[in-house]
Image (cartoon, grey):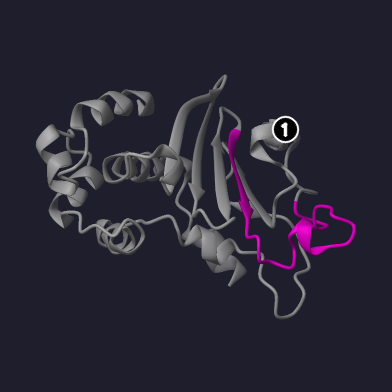
Amino acid sequence: MEVKVLERLPDPIILKRLMKIQASINKFLCQDEWLRYHSFIQDWAEGVCMAKIDNGAGDHLIILFSHEGCIIKGFDHESGLSPHAQDEHKVWQGIYDDVPKELLSLLEDDAIEKDDVTFCIWRKNNDTSWHKGKVEIPEGESDGSDFLLGCIFYTPEDFVEFAKDYFELSPSLDVVREIYDDFPITEEMIHLLNPNCETKEVLQELNDLI
């Protein structure tokens, strides 16, 4: 299972593109920023972009893209590896031990909540594969990586199925396919995804993702 979790992840360039696409569609489907499941901040810090998945139930996935590489911090609040599940209230041993310093330092911003973590995955720009810390997971427990990485939707079909459930909308699969294929986004496309969306407002927001 561990190998499959890492093998599922595409290289950082493709992952960044996917996260931007999903963040864009979230803007169209949900006017309330705090309720969006996927988000993306192009200029999170100097030379750093941030993608985030927040399911509103206490679980999150933060992905930081930098010139040095990419680091993914995940937090499953129900996991036994959570600091909140331990008397010592500390990061589970091994999660951050092998992370390169130049990538680990990206998590130091208070808004990242570095210690709220149940798994960490990283990949330096000169790496050919993703890495994960050597963590002993107790029998019957999960670090949440399979669950949270499953919230990255690689196909338009998977995203539409998710959106129907989460946003209680039925976005056009044809339009979602076009966005996944990098078609220029128009007001008409946004209206087909969500007739109630303020199209001019979200088109302006899209500039933040470029």
Residue sitting at 74 percent across and 80 percent down? 139
Residue type pointed to by label 1: Glu
Classify residue 103 as left or right of residue 178.
Answer: right
Question: Circle 1 sits in a helix, a strand or a loop, which is it?
Answer: helix
Q: Quadrant of residue 95?
A: bottom right
Examine the residues drawn in magenta and state their main secondary structure.
loop
Residue sitting at 41 percent across and 45 percent down? 36
Residue farthest along the left direction in this orientation: 188
Q: Quadrant of the N terminus?
A: bottom right
Q: Residue 156: x, y in percent? A: 26, 56
Classify residue 169 as left or right of residue 120.
Answer: left
* Residue 129 seen in render: no
Q: Residue 41: x, y in percent? A: 46, 31
Residue sitting at 18 percent across and 47 percent down? 193
Residue sitting at 12 percent across and 46 percent down? 192
Q: Quadrant of residue 105?
A: top right
Residue 74: in magenta span: yes
**Is the residue 193 above or below the residue 82 in the image?**
above
Magenta residues, start to end: 69-95
Residue farthest along the top direction in this orientation: 46
Q: Decide: few, some or many residues near mark 1? Use Cα within 10 Å; few <14, some 14-19, many ≥20.
A: few
Q: Residue 68: x, y in percent? A: 61, 31
Q: Residue 146: x, y in percent? A: 55, 66
> Circle 1 is placed at which residue position?
108
* Residue 52 seen in render: yes
Residue 156: in magenta span: no
Q: Quadrant of the C terminus?
A: top left
